[in-house]
Image (spheres, rainbow, N blue to C red):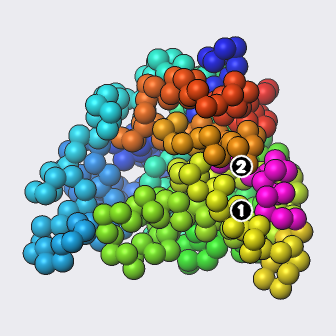
Amino acid sequence: MSYNGHLVVDTDTHIREYWDLDRTYKEYIDPKYLATYERLSAAIRGAQRRPGDVGFGPVYTHPPLRPLGVYDAFGTRGRGGSADGEAPNRAILRNGTEIDPACNWDPNCRLRDMDEERVDVHVLFSSQSDNFCVLHDVGFERALNEAYHRYASAFCSESKGRLRWLTNAVIRDIPATIAELTYWAEHDENYAGVFVTRMLPDGGLLDSPDLYPLWERTQDLDLPIWVHGDPDHQPLTPGYASLNNAAFSRPVLKGWGGQAALGALIGGGVFDLFPRLRIGFFENGGGSWMPWFIEKLDEGYRPGSSSTPYMKRKPSEIVAGGQVFCAIDPLEKLRNCVEDLGEDVWLLGTDYPHTGTPWPNSVSIIADRPELSESAKIKMLGENAKRFLPRLCA
């Protein structure tokens, strides 16, 4: 146990499958889709300028980043990086530390990084699978995700429970998503639940009755739902296009996307219709906005009203009831979130190995926070994760 005898769980880490796409998918893809996959792989490799580039332009092209105050850019706008469009070295973190990209395909490399940071367990999200919802062929989207699931299961298989992984929901095929959930829940003890995007591919919200079968099966299996998203990934966060990809839009929309997901689930009565369902929210800065947001929902949502007919409890009561969890960045201001919503909601989430992660300092950053009680630190670092994902106790 890595923090004073207590488990430490990083609930938001990633496989950067694009670093070497063929390692992730080619061996595991359904042979029926191999030729289609090889065309996709060649297109992505052709779009990558250096190792670690995402290269998903052939799947979805981002609008150019608009520097604030600049309107007549004359083709000089880029999507991050320097003014001349040079791609950053994605192995170098913002804090100047370098992460070995082999952590995406060599579990021993990742485990060494975990030991250095004093983390016991990583939960692995894919990094780009949400973009596959724009593919015309839903069968190909499904085949890509199923290939990733086989890869992730194999990647975690020799970790003695230290590496846990998630299936990727195919929202356009809920029966297939449930079948994958059920299969892996029964066949892999390292399996941790389903990654669901913050919006539906058609722009709908997570209160949709189309998702009820997924919520029901998930709670029956005593597994959580993991809501994660990025403003410029598909499905796009509302406001992304209208803000014209302005330089501030990404941090603003990270929070707004989480609020849209949480507000729909609470107001839509999902937690009351499925009282054993647990849902976590990841990579959205929730420690900063969730206390304010729940306060505002309490003011605006009345149980059983015409606008929230299926909601039976106040939003703050739902959060206090143990069904809602939220990952915090170790660098966030954490005192208010604990004071306002208690110690039992918050999970450690570092976004490793993406460039913004505070690795290898995440655990020490929280451990050294004088404003947090010892019990709050223990819960944030791992005890809350055990309630969110009881399989960690096995």
Q: Position of residue 137 (x, y in %)?
A: 49, 71
Vertical position of residue 249 compared to residue 239: above or below: above
Going from N to C along the chain, the mark reached first, 1 or 2, is 1
Magenta stretch: residue 236 in it?
A: no
Q: Position of residue 119 (x, y in %)?
A: 56, 23
Q: How many marks?
A: 2
Res. 18 visible in picture: yes
Vertical position of residue 189 compared to residue 31: above or below: above
Q: Residues within 10 Å of mark 1 (few under 14, many from 20)?
A: some
Most extreme residue toward the bottom is 306
Q: Position of residue 99 (x, y in %)?
A: 35, 29
Dot 1 and dot 2 residues touching (CB under 8 Å): yes
Report the disc number at residue 340: 2
**Kind of residue at badge 2:** Asp
- Say which element carries label 1: helix
Left or right: residue 315 compared with residue 251: right
Vertical position of residue 270 compared to residue 154: above or below: below
Q: Quadrant of the N terminus?
A: top right
The part of the chain drawn in magenta is 313-326
Q: Looking at the image, which is closer to me, 44 or 274?
A: 274
The image quarter containing residue 171 is: bottom right
Res. 226 visible in picture: no
Point 61% across, 17% down: residue:
2
Report the disc number at residue 295: 1
**Kind of residue at badge 1:** Glu
- Say which element carries label 2: helix
